[in-house]
Image: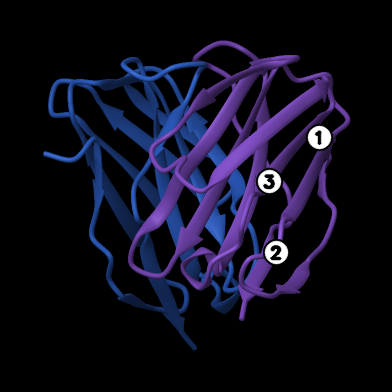
Chain colours: A blue, B purple
Amino acid sequence: QKEVEQNSGPLSVPEGAIASLNCTYSDRVSQSFFWYRQYSGKSPELIMSIYSNGDKEDGRFTAQLNKASQYVSLLIRDSQPSDSATYLCAGFDSGGGADGLTFGKGTHLIIQP
Amino acid sequence: DVKVTQSSRYLVKRTGEKVFLECVQDMDHENMFWYRQDPGLGLRLIYFSYDVKMKEKGDIPEGYSVSREKKERFSLILESASTNQTSMYLCASSLTGFIYEQYFGPGTRLTVT
């Protein structure tokens, strides 16, 4: 199993609905997780971080972490066309060096007006 | 706000040329990273550095070298550019510790002809 896995999509969600993005991880990745948003041709932009089990909310975004099941998710409420982007999940790689993050390949999200 | 800047947004070089990509961060971060991003392959770590003059190979170091003479600056060098090094190059920086996010620069789109 790769360290961080995401469904590549595209995931199509109607405007105003909840978009749910999921990520699973292996034992080597632990402790902290990050969600990045990347628009086409741009660099990744950090939108959420989560370190402990449960939910963390920030505006329309909620990150969820379940360490027992080894998954982390991102919910986007009231989805807007401007949320259309690729979302990268990243986990702290305890087996790597120098505080490296292991990234998933990303899920392409499309919000349909 | 953390700011990571990269020397060029777009660069076109010829095969065999020596190419320098520079990255500067203004937040006194210990760690700096160079990634390349290609469609379908995600982000791949080339090199990272956790201190001045210190460097570690990432997943795909072949054909690249790095230099970190000052804490705020991390350079990526393509010794002899080849067409398979055409890619988006992303620099990132972070503090030390699993709770700290990586912040990305705007990226350099390099084309080798």
Q: Mark 3 or mark 1, which is nearer to you?
A: 3
Q: Which residue is mark 1?
A: B2
Query: What residue is drawn where x is 52% and y is 54%?
Result: B36
Residue A77 seen in the figure: no
Q: Which residue is mark 3?
A: B77
- What distance separates the C-alpha of mark 3 from that of mark 2? 11 Å
Q: Position of residue A24 (x, y in %)?
A: 21, 40
| Amino acid at circle 3 | Ile
Q: Mark 3 or mark 2, which is nearer to you?
A: 2
Q: Chain of mark 3?
A: B
Residue A24 seen in the figure: yes
Query: Quick check: B67 above or below A11?
Result: above
Q: Earlier in the sequence, mark 3 or mark 2?
A: 2
Using residue B7 as the reference point, say whether residue A75 is left or right of it. Answer: left
| Amino acid at circle 1 | Val
- What distance separates the C-alpha of mark 3 from that of mark 1? 24 Å
Using residue B99 as the reference point, say whether residue B58 is left or right of it. Answer: left
Q: Position of residue A11 (x, y in %)?
A: 30, 73
- At label 2, counting other C-alpha atoms closer than 10 Å, the crowd grade (few under 14, some 14-19, many 20 or more) is few
Query: What residue is drawn where x is 85% and y is 54%?
Result: B7
Mark linked to residue A53? none
Residue A63 position by quadrant: top left
> Which residue is farthest bottom?
A113
Q: Secondary structure at mark 2?
A: loop
Q: Work out whether residue B109 or residue A65 is closer to the camera in this orientation and state it.
A: B109
Q: Chain of mark 2?
A: B
Mark linked to residue B17? 2
Residue A103 position by quadrant: top left
Q: Work out whether residue B112 or residue B4 is closer to the camera in this orientation and state it.
A: B112
Q: Earlier in the sequence, mark 3 or mark 1?
A: 1
Q: Specify the quadrant that holds the N terminus of chain A.
A: top left
Q: Work out whether residue A10 or residue B113 is closer to the camera in this orientation and state it.
A: B113
